[in-house]
Structure formats: structure tokens, C-alpha cells
Image (cartoon, coloured by chain):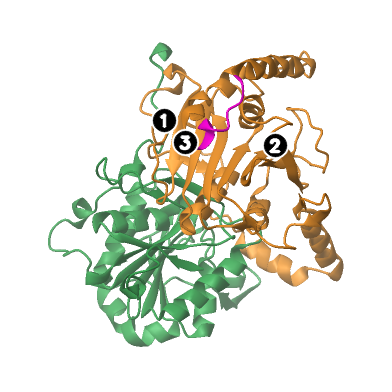
Amino acid sequence: MFVPCDRGGDSASSDFKGSTLLVPAVSVGNVGQLAADLVISTFDMTKVGYFYTDCLVPMVGNNPYATAEENSMELSINAEVYSLPSKKLVVLQIRSPFIKNKYRPFCQTLLSWVKSSKCARVVLLSSSHAYQRDDEQLLGTPLRYLLTPDLEKAVGGLMQELNWKEMEKVAAYPGINDTEKVLHIPGGGITKLLFTESCSKGIQMAVLLKFCSEGDNIPDAFALVNYLNEWLQLIKSEVNTSSQWKIPSSWRLLFGNGLPPALF
Amino acid sequence: MATFFGEVVVAPSRAGVDDEESAEEACEETPEDREIRRELKKKREIDVLWTLKSGASSEGSAGEAFVCSKFIIAMGHNAAAFLSSFILDSVCWEVVGVVKLWNEWCRTSNTTNVLPTDSFCLFYRLISDPTVFLCQCSCYVAEDQQFQWLEKVFGCMRKEGLQVTILSTCPVADYKTQESTLTLPSPFLKALKTKEFKEQVCCPLLEQPNIVRDLPAAVLSYCQVWQIPAVLYQCYTDVIKLDTVTIEAFKPLLSSKILKSLVKDVSESTKILKKLLTTNETHNNIYI
């Protein structure tokens, strides 16, 4: 459930009507979450609430977007909501994996919150195993999109203009029957479930995903935010957009501590 | 996935959901499977048994909520032993509750006569001030049980005027720092506090990119969301078993506002610490 930070005061900070909601899927390489971190960090988004749930593994830490001593002491939990009213942008950041068998209840809770908060549309940032690509997918762009029917009506044309590639369906029974096609997003976590549920619930959702493998996924995160930016134009894209995304301070030491000097 | 050397390995997916498998499982689940799942879920349920003033035991949810001004929770053997050595005694404190749980790593029972190396979760109340509660949780509370623990324990407490202190330990190898952890003088304390906690902390705050997990994280998250002042003191140590050096690393807390008034006699503490050491050795064998 969504719990606002500011209980008293005005509820303007948690009024998401008409906003674009960015949600990362916990997926291969954590690319969606890294991309969400970049958006929150670059625009210095304000934390407006928590997504309190028993479906995610608990974790806490100090402010991952701290820029100075003064703002480094605010506690962060595993699922938090950030807002940028000037761009009508809301981000739900998810920082830990699902507890076993809890991903379905989480999807239900998330989608019912999406409906009740009256967000205009949801953009799900995700990724899929690069090694599962077929011969055609190995060539060209590793970025894909999906739109629910309700959003297709609104922005389908724009995707054509941007020359984006829609996520291909694969044969349900490869080698046996190639006519029946299904959506298959290996390594995408709850992406497929959220997407199919959104289709049936009339939610305007777009899925933006990148094919990648586990490893140093920072470049993948940059690729995904730049992809998102082609559509939403959060940063003006005349100049080199990659250099304009701000890496959060918590991205330090991703690959371990320093080495003991005695090793050499 | 293929590695650089050309071998194909099965990489664990951070996605956490083998979606295709789970979908198939859901379709193929027989009534027997569902029954087994239900039984397992029941077996993993946590029971919080409170002993009321009259001495009768009751389930946590029945009856009125306790008024609680201070709740001190020690998680893990060393933190629990710290409280046993420096705070708890049988004269000033009474046992008021116990948690019964089972998971793959441990099982607790409702006995209150426990050794420092046992798995147990007990609640105590200060006799002279029944709003002060203390918990020693020396058992592993699994991921899927943490939320239950929270709801069943905090569900019995009135939140107004409540302040929570959590003591916990974790391996120093988990500490992320620019230097190597080999050169760090461990054990050392780091703190995390909720927005509402306005008092002085007894040690430096835990810097990013370090995080805290498991039950301490669950309790602190709960307090942050529901605006309860709370502080977590995490001791980073390189000893996994009961160890007096690790226990003594918590000593700076004895001068904190919350614990200052609860500290017992120093000579008592030294005696208990010595006893702990011998108890520990009895349980040692040739394997470290």
C-alpha cells in the first residue's frame, strides 16, 4: 500500500492524477532499477511516500541519492515513491527481490494502486536475457517496446515515427507449430504478468526493455534511459544526453571493496 | 549465459521469477500440491504467546494493546548476550512473551530457560516500569516470516510515545568500503535511524552504499513508514559465534538515553560475560 511521507499537510505531493508513472521490473541485470535511479538522481526528485508491502525482501539504508552531508542521513526502504511535479513524473523505485510466491499479490497491489492514483500512464522499465534472442534479434537494436491496447491508441503513431521496434512474439511450440505466437520475456521478472494484466484491465502501460546479460549493467541502464528519453523528452536531446544523467552516490563499490595492499 | 571462455553456465536470475515455470506449475497444481502448500504455509506461521499479568498465556492478538514507551530488540546471539550481561536480570525484569517458529534454519519453543547459544525469541518487561519492553531474538526469522513477526509483535503495542532500539550484528566482510575490510579495526558499530528519531546516536551512521537486511531492516522499515522514532545499531564483526569482544563492542550504547537508566551493576556484568565464555567453550568441539 502507498503510505505518504507527509501525513498532515496538503496531499498535493501525493496527487498523481494525470502523471506518468515509471516502474522498474526487477529483472536481469537490474537494468530497470538502475535506470530509475538515474532518473531520480538526475532530476533530484523528492520522496513523497513508501510502497509498504510484505511481498519484497526488507532492506534499509541511508539516502542513496545523497549529494552532501546534510541530505545523507535520510533513511530509505525497499520500495519508495518519488515525484517531479514540473514534469508530471512519478517514479516507484524497487530495491529488493520478491519473497517466494509473493510476486502475484505484488502485481495485484501495484495495479490497483495505479488505478486508484489515476496516473495517466505507466512505463515499465525492464530487461530480458540477451542469450535467448533468436537470429534476427541478434542484429540491430537491443531495445524493444510494448504498448497495451489503450496506450497504443494514444501513442502508437509516435513509436512508428521514432522507428522503435516492438517486442516480437515467439512460437508457443517452437519446432512443432510455428503459427501460435506468445509473448515471452525471459529474465523480465514480472514484466509479462504486469503487461498482460494491464491489457485486460484497460491500463495504459508501455514496456521499455533492453536485451542484456548480468555483469556491469551501467551502460545498459544508460541505454534504457536514453531510449525512454527519446519518447518522454525529459532531457533535451540536442546535446549528448548520456553525459546529462547524474549517477547517484550509492553506485560506488558495485564490484566490491578495495584490495588489501598486502596482496601485492 | 555464455562466459568469455565459451562455457555455458546457468546464471541465477535477479529477476527472481522463473515466470514460465511458475505459470505452468500453477496450472498443473493438483489438490494434493495445494494441500502440501497450505500445510507448509501453516507450519511456517509464527505464534507470539504473551503471558499477561495474571499469568495466563494468550495469543498476541487477543486483549488490549500494551502501552509501550521503550522497546529494545536484540537480534542475534551476540546482541542478545549483550543485553543479558548488561541489562537483564531476574529481579528487575519478567518474561512476558515468547515466539514459537519453525523454518529450515531453526526452531524455537516456548521454554524460557535458554542457553545463550540456543535459538529463542523472548520478550521481557521491566517490573518497575511496565511500559519498557525488551526482546532477545536469537533465532533466524526467514524472509517470509519477517512481516508476520512485525505485525504480530507491533500489532500488540500502542504506537504513541513508542521509541524502538535495535541491536544487531553482521559479518564485517559485508561492509562496503574503499579500503579492504582486512585493514578495518573490527568489531565496530554503525547506526541507522528513522526520520522521527531526534536523539544523539552513539556511533557514526552507516554510509551508502551499505545496506541492512533481514529482521533488523524489517523493523526499521516499519518504524520509518509508520513514523516511529527508532535507531538500529549494527555491529560489524569478523566472529560469527558468541564472542565477548563483539558483545563489548555494544558498550557505547550504555551511555545512551534509552539504556542509561537500565544498566545493572558492573561486577554482575563481568561475571556473566565470563560465564558466557565458558558456556560457549563447552559447546565447542574440534571444528571451528
Query: Above or below — where is A127 with respect to A196?
Result: above
Question: Where residue B219 sits in the image (x, y, percent)?
Answer: 56, 49
> In this rendering, would A260 be left or right of B284?
left
Magenta extent: B257-265
Front residue of this view, candidates B49 and A62: B49
Q: How many numbered markers are drawn?
A: 3
Q: Earlier in the sequence, mark 1 or mark 2?
A: 2
Disc number placed over residue B203 in the picture, else none:
1
Query: Above or below — where is B82 with respect to A183?
Result: above
How many residues crowd mark 3 within 10 Å: few (<14), some (14–19), many (20+)? few
In the rendered image of this protein, which colour is used for chain A?
Answer: green
Residue found farthest to the left: A238
Chain containing the residue with disc 1: B
> In this rendering, would B37 be left or right of A194?
right
Question: Where residue B61 sits in the image (x, y, percent)?
Answer: 72, 62
Residue type at the position of mark 1: Cys
